Image (spheres, grey):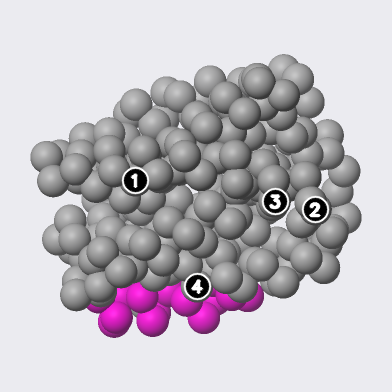
Amino acid sequence: MDATVTILLIAGLITGFSKFSVGGMGMLVLPIIMIAFPGPEALAVMLPLYVITDIMAIYSYREHIKWSVLLRLMPLAFLGVLIGASVLSSIDATQFMTILGVMILAMMALGVYLDMKPATFMQSPLAAYIMGFFGGTVSMLANAAGPIYSLYFLEQKLSKESYVSTRAWAFCLINLSKLPMYLLLGLFTQESLQASIYALPGLAIGIWIGYHFLKKVKPTHFKWVIRILSAMAAFKLFVFS
């Protein structure tokens, strides 16, 4: 039990830090949780933490939301959540771990590609629809849409505050739409909710660190650290799936 609590505290810390700073670290958090909760149940452990931090980020940066950017993204994001729920209902724990590993590597490859190539297409309405749909699907399946939406929002040339606020609104709306889906899939249990509670102290510390960290760095500075750690997490999933 002590090891499980430690894992949950670390996951909470990373989640709080990510949500209030650079974002895109969900693909690292889920493999950590899966050390203690292998399979889709890990999604239900993290979702309440995401909703809490999303609401707090919205409140903290409430004056900086970019509604025009958000509204283009969301309609197909909700469709992606529905598609993701359909896939999630038809796979087992081993398949889930393999799919998660593939998604993590795909998100990393996309990030590297967009670093190397001009990404002006990201500012078009079509890009918003495509990124919205795939982000909703990946979020439902793996809580790992952070790289997709972080890349999209970075390319909108937002201020740091608008970046965090608009991203928080997007994830809050998506995560709230995922709650009934996870309930219908039977992923929420007494054990998962208790695990979420154990992660709260780490979450609070991560929020404090992330809030002050954001004031000192650009969101792009932390990308390669996230990518290296995420690659290690993906390798772990492939080896032990």
Q: Nearer the viewer, mark 4 or mark 3?
A: 3
Tell me what residue is drawn at x 78 percent, y 39 percent.
39
> How far across and down, in percent of the image, does residue 16 sit?
40, 45
Which circle's residue, 1 or 3, is located before the other in the chain?
3
Quarter location, residue 38:
top right
Instruction: Judge by depth and name the residue closer to the eye, 16 or 137.
Output: 16
Residue under circle 2?
A: 189
Question: The disc labelled 3 sits on which kind of residue?
Answer: Leu
Residue 171 position, x and y percent, is 46, 64
Numbered circles on residues, count: 4
Whether the residues at callouts 2 and 4 have beta carbons within 8 Å, the answer is no
Which residue does the image show at 62% across and 46% down from the upper left?
196
The amino acid sitting under disc 4 is: Leu
Give how far apart the Cα atoms at labels 1 and 2 are.
26 Å
Given the image, on which type of amino acid does mark 2 rest?
Answer: Thr
**Marks 2 & 3, CB-CB < 8 Å contact:** yes
Contact (Cβ within 8 Å) of mark 4 with mark 1: no
Kind of element beneath mark 2: loop
Question: Secondary structure beneath disc 4?
Answer: helix
Per the rendered image, the range of residues in magenta is: 66-79
